[in-house]
Image (cartoon, rainbow, N blue to C red):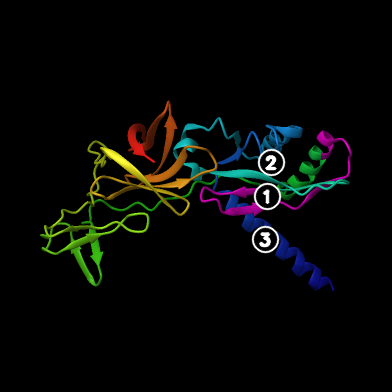
Amino acid sequence: MKSKLLYILLFALGLNYSVSAQLNEYKYIIVPKKFGSFKSENQYQTSTLVKHFFGENGFTAVYDDALPADLAANRCLGLMADLLDNSSMFSTKLHLTLKNCQNVEVFRTEEGKSKTKEFDAAYKEALERAFASFSTMNYQYEPKTQEVVSQDKPLTISFKDDVKTLEEKPKEYVVEQKATLEEQTYKSVEPRPSTIQRPTTASEPQVQVPSGVLYAQPIENGYQLVDSTPKIVLKLGETSMENVFLTNYAGNSAVVFKKDEKWVLEYSDNGEKKMMELDIKF
């Protein structure tokens, strides 16, 4: 009996450590001013309480309308908090969930319950009990380490079983690209120059700038932007915020958002934040 209890205890400790390590990858918790389960903003002080309780447990919590610059440029630095309200006539019951930038749930608390009749007090008590799931985590943000590719070695690309360096002269062949709502078609009998750029120094950045009108075509979980060729220029991933999309630009995470009725691409170039206006037609 003792060995069984010891096994259960060790398993619980190991599971808690695994979850804690997973959350350590995220720098911020994004708290909505209005949770989807409620009719009004900060109803029963839920947004205020959630932000407060996360702060008490060592997390950096921010409201969804006041994102820091690094989080606005890279939404994958944060987890979006949400409340699942399963309350009944006689009790208040809720779960708190955390989802990543791909809308995948990475954590869910134990159910917090309260039988207090006064709503503000009931939701505060239920949230306190739900946040007990974070009390033993010892959260500490640990940035992900990125593999650094040496610039001394020649960059190579692979096509089937052949490996060729960028210095090789491209062979003449027919290229066919596709990208409409399902697929697009583009044919050319001329050899196309490689779009892969060599690694550069910080003083000589090479950033391919989208120009002209870009047409938004719906795809799963977002849109793809194509030019008049047509050729896919960017892919936009939906977020929980209206007119804010995640993308990848120049090898880094970036964000596309609407500002003053104009679409703007915000990205990082050698550690410097830059913004570029896009002409997008939906």
- Tell me, yes or no, whether the highlighted magenta stretch contains residue 143: no
Residue 270 falls in which quadrant of the image? top left
Label 1 Cα neighbours within 10 Å, binned few <14 / some 14-19 / many ≥20 = some
Q: Tell which circle, 2 or 3, labels the residue nearer the N-terminal end.
A: 3
Q: CA distance from mark 2 to mark 1?
A: 8 Å
Q: Quadrant of the N terminus?
A: bottom right
State yes or no: discs 1 and 3 in contact (Cβ < 8 Å). no
What label sits on residue 137 in the rendered view? 1
Task: Kindly identify which residue carries mark 3.
Answer: 15
Q: Is residue 104 magenta?
A: yes
Residue 246 located left or right of residue 187 = right
Q: Which mark is residue 278?
A: none
Q: Which residues are magenta?
A: 96-122
> N-terminal of the two: label 2 or label 1?
2
Q: Specify whether 27 is left or right of 165.
A: right
Q: Secondary structure at mark 3?
A: helix
C-alpha distance separating marks 2 and 3: 18 Å
Determine which quarter of the picture holds residue 227: top left
Residue 117 in picture, x, y percent from top left: 89, 38
Mark 1 or 3, nearer chain start? 3
The CA span between labels 1 and 3 is: 10 Å
Taking the spot 78% from the left edge, 68% from the top edge, the residue there is 6
| Residue 177 place in picture, x, y as percent | 25, 59
Residue shown at the point (51%, 37%) measured from the top left: 242
Q: Amino acid at mark 1?
A: Met
For mark 2, what is the residue?
57
Q: Is residue 19 left or right of residue 168?
A: right
Query: Residue at the location (51% across, 51% down)?
Result: 102
Asked if residue 112 lies left or right of residue 106, the reply is right
Secondary element type, mark 2: loop
